[in-house]
Amino acid sequence: MLTKLKSKKLRALSVVLIGLLSSSNAFAAAGSNLKSDDFVGVSFWMISMALVAATAFFFLETQRVTAKWKTSLTVSGLVTMVAAWHYFYMRDVWVATGATPTVYRYIDWIITVPLLMVEFYLILSAITKVPAGVFWRLMIGTLVMLVAGYMGEAGYMAAWPAFIISMAGWAFIIWEIYFGQAGKINADSAPAGVQSAFKLMRAIVVFGWAIYPIGYFLGYLTGSGPESSMKMLNIVYNLADVVNKIAFGVIIWTVAVSESDKASAK
Ligand SMILES: *C/C=C(C)/C=C/C=C(C)/C=C/C1=C(C)CCCC1(C)C
């Protein structure tokens, strides 16, 4: 019974992965060749593949943890899967045209960043009851941050004011997870393993996420030539995604496994 269920899951997973791979191949065939000195293009390729591998890993590892941690790991896998898919497109836009794939980047963020915020809610919900206000405040902060950022990058708004509004949205998120209700619930009710994961995750929201506004600053606010600043912008955003999507998921995986092992040892 158990093995039957498992093989079904594995089949479902392989369908997902084959889908990912074939969509990338179809697109690559229509695109152009990656040049050996196009390091931004190389980073797009490497990160696409790392995201695919991370997706398979997170989905498969859901089998190893107890029920209430499965959702967190599934969400981690969704984040890397959605990002991988967008990376295939971003990579081709960059390699074929040398243009910054702003629209794909933000479509990716508007899906994956709320999912990352949900992770805070989920890891706290795995241990105690969490009021819905926590969830909504994290969502509102995310929306303000991303909508303003997009308006600045796509030219609907001047780069500086958009930057400032977006920074305010990010600050609001940080406030909630450090000093707001989310931070308090963690400090008051979470077991040690969850607390340390929560602390690492929120440190990522401060230090890992800080890489994006730095990229925006270097890309739009330094007044350097558009070609070099766009290379800088894309390399910085790509590296930031490794930390904030893959490493973030790995932290959740670590706590999910250790808390599950503890539960089964009881
Ligand atoms: C997986 C993608 C993630 C975690 C993306 C996060 C993006 C940000 C934290 C972006 C923040 C920005 C600012 C705080 C100001 C300038 C504009 C943004 C949108 C780059």
Image (spheres, grey):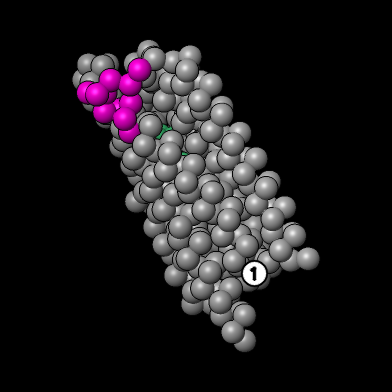
Front-most of 208 and 37? 37
Pick the quarter of the image with the N terminus: bottom right
Q: Is residue 158 left or right of residue 231?
A: right
Front-most of 173 and 77? 77
Please name the amino acid that badge 1 sits on. Answer: Thr
Residue 17 percent coordinates (x, y): 58, 40
Q: Quadrant of ligand 1?
A: top left
Determine whether 112 is above or below 39 in the image.
Answer: below
Residue ranking furthest to the right: 1
Front-most of 142 and 95? 95
SS class, disc 1: loop
Pick the quarter of the image with the C terminus: bottom right
The structure residue drawn at horizontal position 27% and vertical position 16%, both measured from the top left corner, is: 226
Q: How many marks?
A: 1
The structure residue drawn at horizontal position 43% and vertical position 21%, both measured from the top left corner, is: 92
Does the rendering let one see residue 93?
Answer: yes
Residue ranking furthest to the bottom: 266
Residue 197 percent coordinates (x, y): 46, 66
Q: Which residues are magenta?
A: 33-43
254 is within the stretch colored magenta? no
- What residue would you read off at disc 1? 66
Q: Is residue 142 left or right of residue 32?
A: right
Determine whether 92 is above or below 265 in the image.
Answer: above
